[in-house]
C-alpha cells in the first residue's frame, strides 16, 4: 500500500505544489500590487473601512489599480478584521 493513499508520489507532489502556490497568492493583496499601493489602501481603510464610490475612484487613480481591485481589497480587509474580532 502506498503512503499516499491510492495516489502515486508524483500526484502527491503536484498537489502539494499547487496548494503552496495558492497559499502564496493569499499573501499578495491585491495580486501583484506594490508596497506603496498596499500602504495607501491600508491608510484609507484605517480612516474609513466602507468608502463611497467617489473615494474608491480616487483610490483607484491614486494607486493605479482598477476599481474592482480596490473594492475587492476593502471587502477582504473587512473580512480579515471581522475574523480577528470574533
Image (cartoon, rainbow, N blue to C red):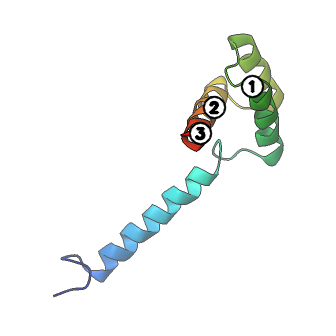
Decide: is 38 above or below 9: above
At which x and y percent is residue 36?
Answer: 84, 43
Where, quadrant-wise, is the N terminus in this rendering?
A: bottom left
> Mark 2 or mark 1, which has the lower sequence index?
1
Q: Where is residue 17 drawn, in percent x and y?
A: 45, 69
Q: Nearer the viewer, residue 35 or 85?
A: 85
The structure residue drawn at horizontal position 65% and vertical position 44%, both measured from the top left corner, is 29
Q: Are marks 3 and 2 in contact (CB under 8 Å)?
A: no
Q: Nearer the viewer, residue 23 or 68?
A: 23
Kindly state the secondary structure of the residue where label 3 is placed.
helix
Image coords of residue 67 (percent x, y): 66, 23
Classify 10 Å Cα crowding around label 2: few (below 14), some (14-19), many (20 and above): some
Q: Which mark is residue 24?
A: none
Disc 2 and disc 1: Cα gap in Å?
Answer: 8 Å
Compare residues 83 and 72 and report the one nearer the observer: 83
Whole-number angstrom distance, CA of label 3 to CA of label 2: 24 Å
- Disc 3 target residue: 85
Q: Is residue 68 above or below residue 16?
A: above
Q: Using residue 30 as the reference point, say whether residue 22 is left or right of it.
A: left
Q: Which residue is mark 2?
A: 69
Mark sitting earlier along the chain (3/1): 1
46 to the left or right of 73: right
- Displayed quadrant of residue 57: top right
In the picture of the structure, the residue carrying the numbered disc 1 is: 60
The quadrant in which residue 14 appears is: bottom left
Please indicate whether residue 84 sits to the left or right of residue 47 in the image.
Answer: left
Question: Disc 2, disc 1: CB below 8 Å?
Answer: yes
Amino acid at each position: 500500500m502506498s503512503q499516499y493513499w491510492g495516489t502515486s508520489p508524483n500526484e502527491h507532489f503536484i498537489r502539494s505544489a499547487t496548494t503552496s502556490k495558492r497559499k502564496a497568492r493569499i499573501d499578495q493583496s491585491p495580486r501583484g500590487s506594490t508596497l506603496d499601493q498596499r500602504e495607501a489602501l491600508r491608510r484609507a481603510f484605517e480612516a474609513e473601512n466602507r468608502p463611497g464610490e467617489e473615494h474608491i475612484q480616487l483610490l483607484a487613480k491614486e494607486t493605479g489599480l482598477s476599481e474592482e481591485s480596490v473594492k475587492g481589497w476593502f471587502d477582504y480587509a473587512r473580512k480579515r478584521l471581522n475574523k480577528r474580532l470574533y
